[in-house]
Protein backbone atom coordinates (compact mmCIF):
# COMPACT_ATOMS: atom_id res chain seq x y z
CA UNK A 1 0.00 0.00 0.00
CA UNK A 2 2.84 2.41 0.82
CA UNK A 3 4.43 1.75 -2.53
CA UNK A 4 1.17 2.55 -4.29
CA UNK A 5 0.86 5.84 -2.41
CA UNK A 6 4.48 6.68 -3.27
CA UNK A 7 3.89 5.98 -6.98
CA UNK A 8 0.74 8.13 -7.02
CA UNK A 9 2.61 10.99 -5.32
CA UNK A 10 5.45 10.79 -7.85
CA UNK A 11 3.04 10.80 -10.78
CA UNK A 12 1.15 13.76 -9.33
CA UNK A 13 4.42 15.63 -8.82
CA UNK A 14 5.43 15.01 -12.43
CA UNK A 15 2.12 16.40 -13.69
CA UNK A 16 2.45 19.53 -11.57
CA UNK A 17 5.99 20.10 -12.89
CA UNK A 18 4.77 19.97 -16.51
CA UNK A 19 2.04 22.50 -15.75
CA UNK A 20 4.67 24.86 -14.33
CA UNK A 21 6.74 24.58 -17.52
CA UNK A 22 3.70 25.46 -19.64
CA UNK A 23 2.97 28.49 -17.46
CA UNK A 24 6.56 29.70 -17.78
CA UNK A 25 6.47 29.25 -21.57
CA UNK A 26 3.23 31.21 -21.79
CA UNK A 27 4.63 33.95 -19.57
CA UNK A 28 7.76 34.14 -21.72
CA UNK A 29 5.74 34.47 -24.93
CA UNK A 30 3.41 37.07 -23.47
CA UNK A 31 6.33 39.06 -22.05
CA UNK A 32 8.13 39.01 -25.39
CA UNK A 33 4.94 40.03 -27.16
CA UNK A 34 4.33 42.93 -24.78
CA UNK A 35 7.91 44.15 -25.08
CA UNK A 36 7.78 43.86 -28.86
CA UNK A 37 4.66 46.03 -28.98
CA UNK A 38 6.34 48.65 -26.80
CA UNK A 39 9.43 48.55 -29.03
CA UNK A 40 7.28 49.09 -32.12
CA UNK A 41 5.91 52.24 -30.49
CA UNK A 42 9.40 53.46 -29.54
CA UNK A 43 12.02 51.61 -31.62
CA UNK A 44 15.03 53.55 -30.32
CA UNK A 45 14.39 52.83 -26.64
CA UNK A 46 17.55 51.02 -25.59
CA UNK A 47 16.14 50.01 -22.20
CA UNK A 48 13.26 48.09 -23.83
CA UNK A 49 15.62 46.37 -26.24
CA UNK A 50 17.94 45.47 -23.37
CA UNK A 51 15.03 44.08 -21.36
CA UNK A 52 13.89 41.92 -24.28
CA UNK A 53 17.46 40.77 -24.95
CA UNK A 54 17.87 39.78 -21.29
CA UNK A 55 14.58 37.90 -21.43
CA UNK A 56 15.74 36.00 -24.52
CA UNK A 57 19.02 35.18 -22.76
CA UNK A 58 17.25 33.93 -19.65
CA UNK A 59 15.38 31.42 -21.83
CA UNK A 60 18.46 30.42 -23.83
CA UNK A 61 17.17 32.03 -27.03
CA UNK A 62 20.53 33.33 -28.24
CA UNK A 63 19.40 34.29 -31.73
CA UNK A 64 16.75 36.70 -30.41
CA UNK A 65 19.18 38.15 -27.90
CA UNK A 66 21.77 38.59 -30.65
CA UNK A 67 19.42 40.58 -32.88
CA UNK A 68 18.45 42.93 -30.06
CA UNK A 69 22.04 43.30 -28.85
CA UNK A 70 23.27 44.15 -32.35
CA UNK A 71 20.60 46.83 -32.64
CA UNK A 72 21.48 48.23 -29.19
CA UNK A 73 25.12 48.47 -30.27
CA UNK A 74 24.14 50.19 -33.53
CA UNK A 75 22.14 52.77 -31.59
CA UNK A 76 25.01 53.58 -29.24
CA UNK A 77 28.35 52.27 -30.46
CA UNK A 78 30.21 54.25 -27.77
CA UNK A 79 28.63 52.17 -25.00
CA UNK A 80 31.24 49.56 -24.14
CA UNK A 81 28.79 47.58 -22.02
CA UNK A 82 26.63 46.93 -25.09
CA UNK A 83 29.72 45.78 -27.00
CA UNK A 84 30.63 43.47 -24.13
CA UNK A 85 27.11 42.01 -24.05
CA UNK A 86 27.21 41.49 -27.81
CA UNK A 87 30.57 39.74 -27.66
CA UNK A 88 29.34 37.46 -24.86
CA UNK A 89 26.39 36.38 -27.01
CA UNK A 90 28.70 35.68 -29.95
CA UNK A 91 30.90 33.64 -27.62
CA UNK A 92 27.92 31.62 -26.37
CA UNK A 93 26.79 30.99 -29.94
CA UNK A 94 30.30 29.82 -30.78
CA UNK A 95 30.26 27.40 -27.86
CA UNK A 96 26.77 26.06 -28.59
CA UNK A 97 26.95 25.95 -32.37
CA UNK A 98 24.29 27.25 -34.71
CA UNK A 99 21.12 28.68 -33.16
CA UNK A 100 17.83 26.86 -33.71
Image (spheres, rainbow, N blue to C red):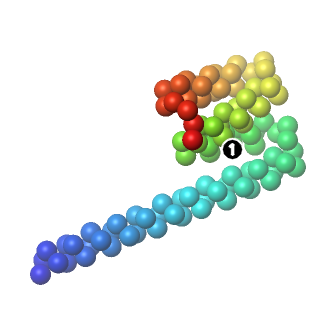
Q: In which quarter of the image is the C terminus?
A: top right
| Residue at the limit of the structure toward the right, as seen here | 41
Residue at (13% x, 77% y) in the render: 2
Residue 58 makes an appearance in the image: no
Q: In which quarter of the image is the N terminus?
A: bottom left
Numbered-mark total: 1
- Residue 79 vertical placement versus 9 (above, below): above
Q: Which of 63 and 30 is in front in this view?
A: 63
Across and down, in percent, residue 32 comes to 69, 52
Q: Is residue 86 visible?
A: yes
Q: Which residue lies furthest to the bottom in this view?
A: 1
**Residue at the spot x=75%, y=43% of the render?**
48
Pinpoint residue 7: horizontal percent, then vertical percent.
21, 72
Quarter of the image for residue 55 reads: top right
Residue 51 image-quadrant placement:
top right
Q: Is residue 2 left or right of residue 9?
A: left
For the point 62% across and 22% down, the residue is 87
Graded by Cα atoms within 10 Å as few (under 14), some (14 to 19) or many (20 or more), the crowding at tag 1 reads many
Write the residue at 85% across / 37% down: 44
Nearer-the-camera pick, 89 or 51 = 89
Looking at the picture, how far across and down is residue 34, in whole percent? 74, 56
Tell me the element at label 1.
helix
Classify 50 as above or below 36. above
Would you name the residue on which mark 1 appears? 52
Q: Where is residue 28 in the image (x, y as percent from the top left)?
A: 61, 55
Amino acid sequence: MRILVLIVCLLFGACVEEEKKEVVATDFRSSISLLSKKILENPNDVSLLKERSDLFLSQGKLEGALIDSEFIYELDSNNYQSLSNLSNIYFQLGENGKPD
